[in-house]
Image (cartoon, grey):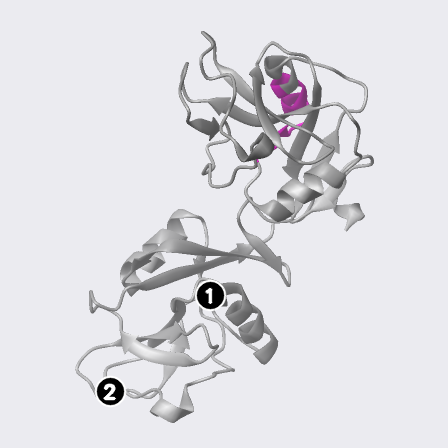
């Protein structure tokens, strides 16, 4: 995996991380420094990522993260890369401590314990940059077999699922092997929601299903106990749904009550 990153960068979860060991900059300077490396300061979204950041080239001094107070005296912070501020690890479990100051504060992290603290953005400290790895996936996408997978958090009908993936320069997923089906099942099971695949009935009342990307329909994993596909005689076209158990169902493509998640795929960025 180290081959996916430049020398002195560390690979984690499809991205490359770089930590300055001797360069102390204020927040604005740190942001500019990372941008010169075609990177950005790090935003953290999980305990696992926080732990990786702490263990990566550890040093006693604090370093900047990519977070900043939304406005003066506000308790709310934001990641400047626009990603969701959905995880925190404040020092001693408390909220920020400098909220009463007449300036915007920025986020820092203690490498000894991974705790966060708000700091005057003019303070000088170390910095941690993150960049896309070579031949990997965009942030929040998962790499498998040279493809990048992404599941939306909203539910929608088949047509809107198609449009959603297309807006991300991707398409709904077509599955061609047991191994790929197992990967996708494990990928979606933590969400406990069914997802649309890229399959659709060839014609009304036809038992033939096709992948809309034109690839061969050479594998299927229909739910046998419920006699899938079971709606091929209906007066509407059906599309393929994958359950979080890995089985497939055929469902009305246009029924507004069939609101499943969109599972998108595209080639990795080489």
Relative depth, front residue between 208 and 180: 180
The residue positioned 41% from the left and 69% from the top of the image is 197
**Front: mark 1 or 2:** 1
Q: Which residue is mark 1?
A: 173
Which image quadrant is residue 8 in?
A: top right
Give how far across and how far down residue 57 sits, in percent.
Answer: 80, 35
Residue 133 visible in the snapshot:
no
Residue range (magenta): 31-43
Q: Is residue 43 left or right of residue 55?
A: left
Q: Is residue 58 above or below residue 106?
A: below
- Other-residue count near label 2 (Cα within 10 Å), few / some / many at <14 / 14–19 / ≥20: some
The answer to which image quadrant residue 255 occupies is bottom left
Q: Residue at x 68, y 24 (%)?
A: 63
Number of numbered discs overlaid on the protein picture: 2
Query: Mark 2 — residue?
Result: 205
Q: Are marks 1 and 2 in contact (CB under 8 Å)?
A: no
Q: Is residue 39 left or right of residue 263?
A: right
Can you give x and y, in whole percent of width and height, for residue 254 in the image? 22, 68
Identify the residue at horizontal 48%, vertical 77% (top origin): 246
Q: Using the numbered discs, state the Cα–Cα distance from disc 1 to disc 2 in whole angstroms.
A: 23 Å
Question: Is residue 191 visible to us here?
Answer: yes
**From the viewer's perspective, is residue 123 above or below residue 151?**
above
Q: Nearer the viewer, residue 180 or 210?
A: 180
- Between residue 135 and residue 193, name the one nearer to us: 193
Kindly indicate the quadrant of the structure image that contains residue 236.
bottom left
Mark 1 surroundings: few (<14), some (14-19) or many (≥20) residues within 10 A: many
Q: Nearer the viewer, residue 175 or 84?
A: 84
Percent position (x, y) of residue 105? 51, 16
**Residue 114 screen position, x and y as percent:** 66, 36
Of the numbered discs 1 and 2, the one sitting upstream in the chain is: 1
């Amino acid at each position: 995996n180290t081959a996916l990153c430049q020398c002195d960068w560390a690979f984690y979860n499809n991205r490359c991380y770089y930590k300055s060991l001797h360069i102390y900059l204020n927040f604005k300077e740190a942001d500019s420094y990372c941008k010169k490396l075609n990177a950005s300061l790090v935003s953290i979204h999980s305990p696992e990522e926080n732990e990786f950041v702490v263990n990566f080239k550890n040093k006693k001094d604090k370093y900047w993260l990519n977070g900043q107070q939304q406005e003066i005296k506000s308790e709310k912070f934001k990641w400047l890369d626009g990603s969701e501020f959905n995880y925190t690890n404040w020092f001693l479990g408390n909220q920020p401590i400098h909220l009463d100051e007449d300036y915007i504060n920025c986020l820092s992290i203690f490498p000894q314990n991974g705790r966060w603290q708000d700091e005057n953005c003019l303070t000088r400290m170390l910095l941690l940059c993150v960049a896309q790895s070579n031949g990997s996936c965009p942030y929040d996408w998962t790499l498998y077999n040279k493809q990048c997978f992404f599941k939306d958090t909203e539910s929608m009908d088949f047509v809107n699922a198609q449009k959603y993936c297309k807006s991300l320069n991707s398409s709904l997923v077509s599955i061609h092997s047991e191994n790929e089906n197992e990967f996708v099942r494990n990928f979606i099971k933590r969400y406990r929601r069914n997802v649309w695949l890229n399959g659709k009935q060839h014609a009304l009342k036809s038992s033939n299903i096709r992948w809309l990307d034109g690839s061969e329909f050479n594998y299927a994993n229909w739910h046998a106990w419920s006699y899938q596909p079971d709606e091929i005689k209906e007066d509407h076209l059906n599309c393929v749904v994958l359950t979080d158990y890995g089985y497939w169902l055929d469902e009305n493509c246009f029924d507004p009550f069939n609101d499943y998640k969109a599972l998108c795929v595209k080639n990795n960025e080489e």
